[in-house]
Amino acid sequence: MKIEIETKIKVDSFESVWDRLKAAGGQLNAKVVQRDTFFVDIEHKLIRSDRGLRLRVQIADGIETVILTYKGPRQKTSFKSRQEIEVEVDSYESMESIFLALGFEKGISFEKRRDLWSLDECEVCLDELPLLGRFVEVEGPSEDKIRLVLQKIGLSASDHIDKSYAKLMREKLKGSLDECTLKGNKFSRVKP
């Protein structure tokens, strides 16, 4: 069972992070675009139990890969830790059809640009998302390794975000829709 251990930090710019990654011996492995779609059951049991089901299309160097991911509930640790099961699938459309046939619905969907770096056994992701901005996400084999990388890239004193991008996006969209509704506008909304 793979346990994902990661932390996320919001930044205004990537420039100082790039410089520190290079100075520390970090290696840029890929620049990718990821389109993530989360699926929800009708009763929203996955969301209420802090679990997730994601179908991701990743494009790197013109090559498209489709990855199905299950994320288990978060464990009580300093950084976000949770079970993660991933499998590559042949077709986004076929997998989406299976989910819909099983009664799942499309939940939130968004795209992000991600630069994938490696440093000291950790993966450092520089992520840019619409509406949310820029984030540095560090995933590693242990909290100690993650802390070491954060120190090397100058982010050890920064506030950590323990929410997923999906949750941050749902909160952002909900706030936007509530604000617009108060102004008397009508919007159809994607189910949370």
Image: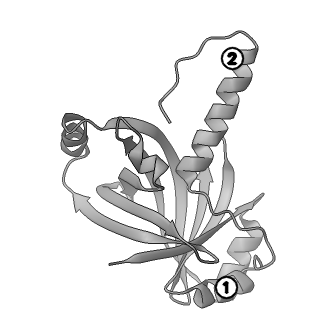
34 with respect to 21 (left or right): left
Tell me the crowding category of disc 2: few under 14, some 14 to 19, or many 20 or more residues within 10 angstroms, Cα based: few
Label 1: element kind: helix
Residue at horizontal 34%, vertical 40%? 41
Which badge, 2 or 1, comes first in the chain's sequence?
1
Tell me the crowding category of disc 1: few under 14, some 14 to 19, or many 20 or more residues within 10 angstroms, Cα based: some
Residue 53 lies, in percent from the top left, at 36, 52
Q: Which mark is residue 93?
A: none
96 with respect to 177 (left or right): left
Residue 143 lies, in percent from the top left, at 59, 85
Residue at horizontal 71%, vertical 19%? 180
Q: Are marks 2 and 1 in contact (CB under 8 Å)?
A: no
Residue at horizontal 20%, vertical 39%? 102
Q: Is residue 108 above or below residue 129?
A: above
Give amino acid for label 2.
Thr
Give amino acid for label 1.
Arg
Q: Nearer the viewer, residue 82 or 122?
A: 82
Label 2: element kind: helix
Q: Is residue 136 above or below residue 113?
A: below
For the N terminus, which image quadrant?
bottom left
Q: Which residue is mark 1?
A: 147
Q: Is residue 25 visible to us here?
A: no
Q: Which mark is residue 181?
A: 2
Residue at horizontal 69%, vertical 50%? 133
Residue 139 lies, in percent from the top left, at 53, 76
Residue 108 lies, in percent from the top left, at 47, 39
Where, by quadrant of the figure, is residue 18 drawn? bottom right
Q: Nearer the viewer, residue 148 or 59?
A: 148
185 with respect to 99 (left or right): right
Where, by quadrant of the figure, is residue 104 drawn? top left
